[in-house]
């Protein structure tokens, strides 16, 4: 291969093949073979992603056009992938953490029957494929296809145990609330086509000067409506805690590597438009800060170990939107990366506790687990230190970069941003670390 970037299409292709094999052959595959196909597909994507990342690090970026997707007069929308610093970083996050979650799932879901086990991995592979399509797309239409794909997969995975009516209701809630946000995204895409005749990033950003202040403000606000749905911001945040109805590895995938980071990616990708719309940036800042505070407050009164983590995710996402709002796009994306690792670790640690407690999730019924689960105790503690921003752990560097940018914008934002850290400290679940009654 002369240039691995030309073969970027292999990254989403492997999970798609895994989805098709496990989905179509689900009743004839053994669990071992299902796990090998499901995990192997993501591992192959990760290896290619690493090679692409090294190429980008060396200064090579490219737009790879696969075929002409839509050709209507002056409006031409190719099916193309954009490989640059932003997309290559997200490729590593999605495939790297995604592979570890797949590997964890082979043991966690082993009690399922062969057919349902394969169905689970098929959905998981499709989820990763959709997210890869979202971050690789070279225009807003390809991004929107992946955007809708992760919405569909969240519905399928949250409602994986479909015989439980509460779980299916949670899945429907996630699907409907995401559709509300998606309408804003879709309107923004149509607005861009009507004003510029293109949705390709390079062309949109090069022609952004032709847009009036009103047009830029409306487009960015509509994109932000889409981001509030996907990334669970006020008022479209209530679906995310209910998403805990799905298997714990699914929660880890949704909250850490895929889906909820899509809104952050979209705004970071559209940073040129947002820097031209200070009114929208103010809205993003206020909504992000309000979500961070509100979700952290709710988390304080939760007893379900997974819901504590869920509201923490909502709060952390608000923190990322604060970074985007004050113009710290690099800091926000950096926090996406660090959060992906320690939140995945927290969810997988919670899954270990739930499994050991015979599917008990109420932390009031747990106690003295440190001596029985020393490895889980240590890993959970490390993740807690990271999310609390304790140096030298990763959260310290990414959080403080956002706080510095917030201070530069307005010192009040720094005070509020520091005050919302209540949720970071409640994650150090006492039942894992001390001998408590019960």
Image (spheres, rainbow, N blue to C red):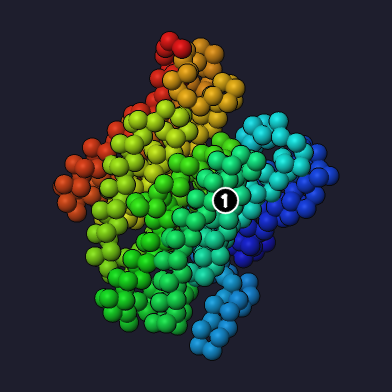
Answer left or right for 409 relative to 92.
Answer: left
Horizontal and vertical percent position of residue 36: 74, 41
Q: Quadrant of the N terminus?
A: bottom right
Q: Mark 1 = which residue?
A: 155
Which quadrant would residue 181 be assigned to in this image? bottom left
Which quadrant would residue 111 be assigned to in this image? top right
Horizontal and vertical percent position of residue 30: 80, 39
Q: Nearer the viewer, residue 355 or 409?
A: 355
Q: Mark 1 falls on what kind of element?
A: helix
- Residue 136 position (above or below residue 309): below
Which quadrant would residue 145 be assigned to in this image? bottom right
Q: Nearer the viewer, residue 196 or 147?
A: 147
- Tell me, yes or no, if residue 224 can be seen here: yes
Q: Residue at x 33, y 31 (%)?
A: 300
Horizontal and vertical percent position of residue 285: 27, 54
Q: Residue at x 52, y 70 (%)?
A: 141
Answer left or right for 110 relative to 367.
Answer: right
Q: Residue at x 30, y 57 (%)?
A: 284
Horizontal and vertical percent position of residue 333: 40, 51
Answer left or right for 24 relative to 59.
Answer: right
Q: Nearer the viewer, residue 133 or 30?
A: 30
Residue situated furthest bottom in the rendering: 73
- Residue 349 position (above or below residue 49): above
- Tell me, yes or no, if residue 256 can be seen here: no
Q: Residue at x 40, y 39 (%)?
A: 311
């Amino acid at each position: 291969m002369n240039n691995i970037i030309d073969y970027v299409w292999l990254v989403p292709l492997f999970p798609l093949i895994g989805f098709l094999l496990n989905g179509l052959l689900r009743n004839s595959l053994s669990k071992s073979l299902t796990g090998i196909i499901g995990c192997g597909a993501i591992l192959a994507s990760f290896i290619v992603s690493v090679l692409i990342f090294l190429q980008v690090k060396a200064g090579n970026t490219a737009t790879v056009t696969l075929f002409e997707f839509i050709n209507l007069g002056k409006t031409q929308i190719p099916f193309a992938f954009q490989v640059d610093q932003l997309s290559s970083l997200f490729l590593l996050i999605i495939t790297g953490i995604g592979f570890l979650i797949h590997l964890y799932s082979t043991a966690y879901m082993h009690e399922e029957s062969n057919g349902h086990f394969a169905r689970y991995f098929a959905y998981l592979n499709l989820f990763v494929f959709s997210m890869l399509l979202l971050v690789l797309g070279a225009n807003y239409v390809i991004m929107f296809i992946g955007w809708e794909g992760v919405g569909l997969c969240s519905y399928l995975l949250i409602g994986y145990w479909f015989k439980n009516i509460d779980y299916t209701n949670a899945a429907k809630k996630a699907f409907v609330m995401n559709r509300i946000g998606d309408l804003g995204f879709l309107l923004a895409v149509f607005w861009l086509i009507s004003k510029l005749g293109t949705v390709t990033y390079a062309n949109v950003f090069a022609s952004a000067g032709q847009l009036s202040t009103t047009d830029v403000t409306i487009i960015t606000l509509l994109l932000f409506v889409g981001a509030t749905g996907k990334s669970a911001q006020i008022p479209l945040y209530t679906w995310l805690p209910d998403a805990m109805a799905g298997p714990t590895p699914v929660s880890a995938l949704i909250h850490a590597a895929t889906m909820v980071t899509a809104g952050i990616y979209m705004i970071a990708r559209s940073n040129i438009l947002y820097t031209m719309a200070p009114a929208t940036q103010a809205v993003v800042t206020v909504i992000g800060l309000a979500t961070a505070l509100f979700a952290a407050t709710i988390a304080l009164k939760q007893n379900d170990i997974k819901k504590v983590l869920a509201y923490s995710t909502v709060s952390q996402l608000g923190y990322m939107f604060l970074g985007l709002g004050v113009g710290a796009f690099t800091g926000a994306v950096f926090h996406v990366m660090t959060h992906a690792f320690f939140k995945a670790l927290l969810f997988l640690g919670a899954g270990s506790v739930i499994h050991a407690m015979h599917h008990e999730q109420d932390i009031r019924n747990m106690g003295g687990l440190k001596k029985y689960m020393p490895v889980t105790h240590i890993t959970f503690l490390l993740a807690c230190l990271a999310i609390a921003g304790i140096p030298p752990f990763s959260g310290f560097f990414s959080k403080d970069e956002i706080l510095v940018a917030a201070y530069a914008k307005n010192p009040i934002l720094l005070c509020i941003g520091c005050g919302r850290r209540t949720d970071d400290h409640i994650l150090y679940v006492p039942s894992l670390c001390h001998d408590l009654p019960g």
